[in-house]
Image (cartoon, grey):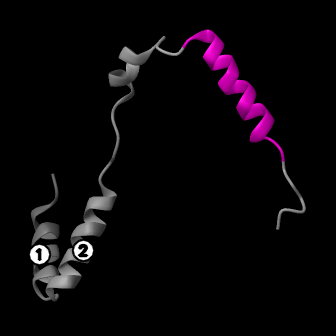
Amino acid sequence: MANAHIKENILNQVDKLPYDMQLRVLDFANSLSPKGVKGDSLSKFRGSISSDDLKLIESAIMEGCEKVDMNEW
């Protein structure tokens, strides 16, 4: 939980801002919050991709993602 002094200072500063800037502060604060799900919740999907499909995926990655085209830029 946030320190009460810090919360009070943040609120005081935000109160001084115009509405559009307050929205920017809110967006920034939201961006700091962790996103996603815990790994344990994904375990139910374990084994849902067949071995053959995993090999195809791995092959596509090896062929397409590990090459550098020095003349691309």
The residue under the point 30% across, 68% down is 28
The residue that appears at 10% across and 81% down in the rendered structure is: 12
Residue 29, located in which quarter of the rendered image? Answer: bottom left
Q: Position of residue 4 (x, y in %)?
A: 9, 63
Disc on res. 25:
2
Q: Quadrant of residue 8?
A: bottom left
Q: Residues within 10 Å of mark 1 (few under 14, many from 20)?
A: few
Residue 70 x/y as whole percent:
89, 59
Q: Which stretch appears magenta?
A: 50-67
Q: Amino acid at mark 2?
A: Val
Name the one closer to the observer, 39 or 59: 59
Give left or right: position of 26 versus 40.
Answer: left
Count all numbered tags in the image, as a single digit.
2
Magenta-colored stretch includes residue 52: yes
8 magenta-colored: no
The quarter of the image holding the C terminus is: bottom right
Residue 26, position as x, y percentages in the image: 21, 69
Q: Point out the residue furthest to the right here.
A: 71
Please tell me which residue is depicted at 13% across the width and 67% down the height of the picture: 7
Which amino acid lies under the numbered mark 1 shown in the image of this protein? Answer: Leu
Q: CA distance from mark 1 to mark 2?
A: 11 Å
Q: Quadrant of residue 51?
A: top right
As drawn, the label of residue 11 is: 1
In this view, the mark in front (1 or 2): 2
Q: Where residue 45 sits: x, y (%)? A: 41, 17
